């Protein structure tokens, strides 16, 4: 056997790394806590330890952060989250971002507990503003969740000056929104920027004259699925 040939074991390890996605750091406290609880339960009664081990594995799976290949074509706004498109409608962006009262196209993606829950940057550019607002924890698939629920709103100015907004919205089960970027940061489309723990929703606002590329009910892959084609040379004034 040639020394440069990969051994079967090494090949299996490489396949496992490619198949099993890494875990987002925000999930580590939950997984560690579940693992400790599993050890305690196992000492009490072995079958309880089995249940705990399954829950620990599920927790690690929930916080997965799979690698994604983002389209490189200019002018696309890609999905910020995995999930199902719940609404495509005209709406005014969150007031705290300062977009004014002119309606934009809002594309809402609903995430269940089975979806990947990290959020991806929809367009490359610079972060103009980030505002966190406390709120209610209504079911994320309701229309009024965009207005009433806890949310973290972010405005991004693309490289050609187009402004879009992406909003993380907590849901019925979610109680914690994580945002790992800051105002003034330069971000690349498809990169992970945050996470919502458990069921939730993500709204993307694009200019009203954008070409929407998805329909309600369609499944999206965060960082990969094009949601809209932005107008060329659009400038925010």
Image: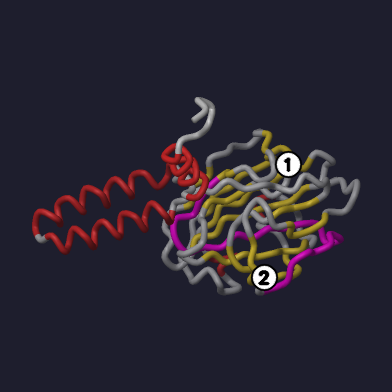
Residue with the mark numbered 2: 218
Q: Tell me where the magenta segment starts and ends, as one range.
A: 194-216
Image position of 50 (left or right of 188): left
Residue 147 drawn at (x, y percent): 59, 65
Quadrant in which the C terminus is drawn: top right
Q: Nearer the viewer, residue 142 or 98?
A: 142
Instruction: Specify the label residue 124 is tagged with.
Output: 1
Determine the secondary structure under disc 1. Answer: loop
Image depth: mark 2 or mark 1 in front: 2
Check disc 1: other Cα within 10 Å, few if <14, some if 14-19, many if 20+.
many
Image position of 178 (left or right of 158): left
Q: Is residue 158 above or below residue 85?
A: above
Whichever of labels 2 and 1 marks the residue nearer the N terminus, that label is 1
Instruction: Specify the label residue 20 is tagged with.
Output: none
Determine the secondary structure under disc 2. Answer: loop
Residue 152 drawn at (x, y percent): 56, 52
Q: Residue furthest right?
A: 233
Residue 219, quarter of picture:
bottom right
Residue 188, quarter of picture:
top right
């Amino acid at each position: 056997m040639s020394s440069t040939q990969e051994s079967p074991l090494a090949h299996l390890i490489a396949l496992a790394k490619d198949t099993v996605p890494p875990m987002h750091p925000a999930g580590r406290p939950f997984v560690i806590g579940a693992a400790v609880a599993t050890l305690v339960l196992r000492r009490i009664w072995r079958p309880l330890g089995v249940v705990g081990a399954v829950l620990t594995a599920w927790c690690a799976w929930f916080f997965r952060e799979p690698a994604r290949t983002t389209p490189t074509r200019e002018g696309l706004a890609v999905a910020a989250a995995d999930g199902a498109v719940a609404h495509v409608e005209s709406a005014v962006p969150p007031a705290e971002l300062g977009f004014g009262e002119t309606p934009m196209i809002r594309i809402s993606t609903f995430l269940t507990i089975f979806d990947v829950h990290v959020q991806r940057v929809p367009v490359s550019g610079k972060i103009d503003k980030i505002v966190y607002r406390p709120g209610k924890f209504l079911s994320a698939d309701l229309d009024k969740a965009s207005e009433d629920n806890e949310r973290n709103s972010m405005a991004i100015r693309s490289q050609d000056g187009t402004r879009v907004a992406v909003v993380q919205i907590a849901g019925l089960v979610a109680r914690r929104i994580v945002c790992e970027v800051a105002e003034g940061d330069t971000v690349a489309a498809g990169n992970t920027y945050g996470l919502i723990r458990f069921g939730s929703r993500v709204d993307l606002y694009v200019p009203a004259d954008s070409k929407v590329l998805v329909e309600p009910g369609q499944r999206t892959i965060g960082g990969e699925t094009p949601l809209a084609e932005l107008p060329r040379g659009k400038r925010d004034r």
